[in-house]
Image: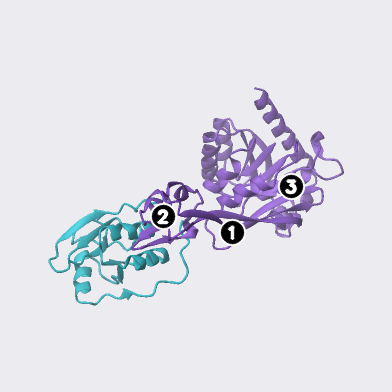
Amino acid sequence: MSKIALTVAAPDLDAELDPRFGRAAFFLLIDPETLAWEGLANPAREARGGAGVQTAQFLAEHEADAVVSGDFGPNAQQALQTAGIAMYIYESCETAREALQRFRAGELPAVDSPRQRPGRGD
Amino acid sequence: MRIAVASGKGGTGKTTVAVSLALSLTTDGAPAGGARYPPLLIDCDVEAPDAHLFLRPTIEKTAAASVLVPAVDESRCTLCGLCADVCEYNALAVLGDEVLLFPELCHGCGSCSLVCPEGAISEGPRVVGRLEAGHAGELRFARGVLNVGEPMPVPVIRQLKAWARPQPGQLSLLDAPPGTSCPMVEVVRDADFVLLVTEPTPFGLHDLELAVEVVRELGLAAGVVINRDGIGDQGVDDLCASEDLPILLRIPFDRSVAEALARGETLIDVWPEYRDRLRELARGVTERVLVAGHG
């Protein structure tokens, strides 16, 4: 079974999307075939640094195959690519349900070439 | 003795005070106050050092400032992930069959190499800035410069303080970065006295309150210099009264000072009488430190 992760403001399919990846409030981990979902609080939300890297590890531990968010920082991109997790941008979508529908329809753009320069962190 | 010149708010006149105070203790022959050496001024604002603009120092020696970052020996690594778990700043990640290192996130604490059960992690220096030392006339001078794009000033400040050592009995004056976060704390933490430079405005007051909290938390002696005196309101005076903070100097607001600073001149170039006032300030601070030390 493949799983996709969505960054959301609250753990619900009708919740608003959270545009941040590393500091997203929650993830919805969804089976795109059955639409069964699980809400996960992001443990890296208050990280002192490297939130994107920690979040990528968190998704790897939960065996996500793809992740949909507003955007991805350079460190997050490098970590996600190494973990083999595909990245998609939700563009103008507002809710998790909408992003999921457009993902399933193959309408969301993928991030395929991570930026060259590593991030600055905080 | 170490005197740190700090502020909460940026642009209050830290460098103006630090440079003019240092120069007041060097000029006309012998060092002031019976000291054996002219003071050492250390520009610790490594993200935006500016004291050199006023002092035009001759640099005699330089050194690299670096952070120790890990390197992983893949032949010994078992991908156990302990290094990534222990890293507070997520500078290491174990993903798939790789250990990813993000050097710019690394604070150089060394925990990863300590916890690695396979001894697979060694540490090596990554240069993040440089240190410089020299003189401007009689005044000894040192500064640190963080490389552009580097996010962490604290290691450069820490190394600068260890590298630019004063002679025994020599006064060091440390020009701190603005704010009240880690870089400022690193500069003031072991000072004998903190001069808090502020301006009498609501913004100056707000940030002075934060800076006072920091020096109280660290148990440091402190006094206040009010710059641009005459603008704003009574808030800073009231705070100093209620916090029992001595106001050691008031520098009036005057356009001619701003113009002179913009030309790279100092306060004592504009108002020579400030040489004596700053010497008086230094004497007062020294007495306070000595009294505190014996009390």
* Residue A103 x/y as whole percent: 22, 72
Q: Colour of chain A?
A: cyan
Marks 2 and 3: which is nearer the front?
Answer: 2
Disc 2 residue type (three-letter):
Asn
* Residue B190 x/y as whole percent: 61, 38
Which numbered disc, 3 or 1, marks the residue that appears first in the sequence? 3
Disc tally is 3
Which element type, helix, strand or loop, lies under badge 1? strand
In this view, the residue in front, B253 or B170, is B170
Q: Name the residue under label 3.
A: B20
Quadrant of res A79: bottom left
Which element type, helix, strand or loop, lies under badge 2? loop
Q: Mark 2 points at which residue?
A: B90
Disc 1 residue type (three-letter):
Val
Chain at numbered mark 1: B
* Residue B143 x/y as whole percent: 68, 52
Which element type, helix, strand or loop, lies under badge 3? helix
Marks 3 and 1: which is nearer the front?
Answer: 1
The disc label shown at residue B127, or none: 1
Check if mark 2 and mark 1 are on a common chain. Answer: yes
B19 over A60 or under it: above or below: above
In this view, the residue in front, B119 or A62, is B119
Name the residue located 27 percent from the left edge and 75 percent from the top edge. Answer: A108
Q: Colour of chain B?
A: purple
Name the residue located 43 percent from the left edge and 60 percent from the top edge. Answer: B75
In this view, the residue in front, A42 or B81, is B81
Quadrant of res B99: bottom left
